[in-house]
Image (spheres, rainbow, N blue to C red):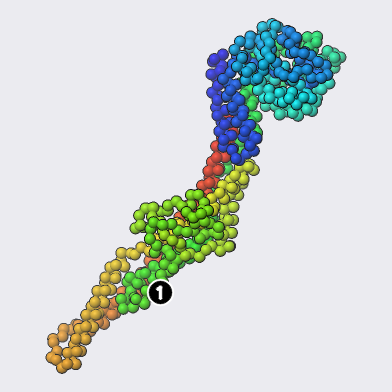
Amino acid sequence: MKLLRRKEGPSLDSRLAALLEAAELAEGRLPEEAVSGARTVAERAGVRRTLSIDHTVAALAGATGSGKSSLYNALAGADLAAVGVVRPTTSAAQAALWDGEGSGPLLDWLDIPQRHPATSASDLSGLVLLDLPDHDSIQVSHRLEVDRLVQLVDLLVWVVDPQKYADAALHDRYLRPLAAHRGVMLVVLNQVDRLPESAVGRCVQDLRRLLDEDGLAGVPVLAVSARTGAGLAQLRALLNDRVAERRSWSTRLAADITTAAARLGAPEEAPAGQAMDRTLTAALCEAAGVPLIVEAVAKGHRHRAVVATGWPVTRWIRKLRPDPLRRLRIGAMAPVGRPVGQLPAGGASAGSPGAPAGSSGEAPGPSGQGPGAEVVGRTSVPAASAVQRVRVETAIRDVGEAAAADLPGPWAAAVRQAARSRSQELADAVDRVVATTSAGATRRPKWWRAVNFLQWLVFAAMLAGALWLGGLFGMDYLRLPQPPLPTVGVVPWPTVLLVGGALAGVLIAWLSRLAAWAGGRRRARRTARALRTAVGRVGDDLVLAPVRAELDRYARFTEALTRARA
């Protein structure tokens, strides 16, 4: 006995755990009735396993007038139940016990107060036989009692009579829904003494056909007469076999698990992960003004290069022009703040009233500002147009549709909802990464400092030449004797310094502008890649990650459901 329990226990435990896991994963995705039903089955199975497995609870169930109580008395060897012909006489279930020691907690759990020791032969040791009320009783309480105990007992013995064995209420309400329980089910055709002997076989054959149509192929069908005792020996022998095996309780629980798992759905292979989705990143980048920012990066780099390396005589003119990046309020804002999103309409600022949860997280700081630094204020990137917002919404919807394409209806809806679940956070998140990622585009290359120093050096030389020539002009004007004048060939040094400094400054400025143009293009390309990566990461975190989590949840649900149905 103990060896048998050890053999079956782990398998049943594993299936129960899998059923509970599937129910938890299906919470909010599948109908509550199916989910709560799975939890109820798991709870019921857990209780039944703790009660006596040395006793098998078999219930005689049937319609009014089928002779249940007569059969119950015949098996028990005593008139324990009142017998009626038309009106139901069994109002509450009662139990007949064969060696019932230790069955008390089990009967308490079943809520069976009426318990009688059986007086027939003890070859049914361990059997607890219940006489149930009629399942078609005019009393609602009787039908409810039948429904309750049908879900709890280990072995179901359906008692039918020749007149009502094809009753649709029996087949539609009980037999067909319990098709998975055919391993713990017997069907007894009672009152065959009322049939001509030649008609018994045809009646049993027709009943067999109906049971096969109900999905109950293989369920034993016995022809019995409680009044004459015909067939009782075969029924008693079959009950003895089931009781001696001590397996009906575990077979019943296994069938319950299979039925509950089936109500959760058929396990299907989870769809393969999809490449999701370049169009989402492209739509977010367009709506966030990335093309405008990239163009401003190139122009801003050239603008700052001219200011830093241009000819000192004319560079101040460039300072009168606005920096394209400063006009967008990018790269000129100090750390320790937060940006305010401008992407799709309807997005609230992080930290403001009505902002979505999680939208105020820190973003990586721009270079030189330390990790975790953020940007103060609002970028001035133009707000997304209606067309751009629609493209973002369409891309999000397409991601959800692509991921949900091969899923059952409720799970497909959950995946689509997951794709949209954090879309309100996109505005702040995208604006934040655009501001912080673009901030690095204002870094000054080291060669600007060297060229600036050189420019001021040649400017100083030009200024020295101009002062020298001015001094010579003044001395000539005052008719003072001219000092010795060094030359470079035939050209005096003051002229060389003045003209050479001016030409050198212009040449250096022109070459620096060429280098700045090429550098601006390179920086714009790097910024474009960085922005696409950063915006793509936001799309992944707020759109694709919830979708992947839902797909993973479905995959785990399918795996658990497969284990539960095994």
Quadrant of the drawing holding the C terminus? top right
Badge 1 element: loop
The x, y position of residue 482, in whole percent, is: 14, 89
Please give the name of the residue rendered at 78% of the width and 9% of the height, measured from the top-left corner. 229
| Residue nearest the observer in this picture, 336 or 317 | 336
Please give the name of the residue rendered at 20% of the width and 83% of the height, measured from the top-left corner. 468
| Residue nearest the observer in this picture, 263 or 102 | 102
User: What is the crowding at mark 1: few (fewer than 14 residues within 10 Å), some, or many (at least 20)?
Assistant: few
Q: Residue under label 1, please give it.
A: 321
Q: In this view of the protein, can residue 207 be seen by the observer?
A: no
The x, y position of residue 210, in whole percent, is: 78, 25
Please give the name of the residue rendered at 26% of the width and 74% of the height, measured from the top-left corner. 456
Compared with residue 248, is residue 472 higher up or lower down, i.e. above or below?
Answer: below
Please give the name of the residue rendered at 49% of the width and 55% of the height, measured from the top-left corner. 352
Which residue type does callout 1 highlight?
Answer: Arg
The x, y position of residue 499, in whole percent, is: 26, 82
Q: In this view of the protein, can residue 556 be seen by the observer?
A: yes
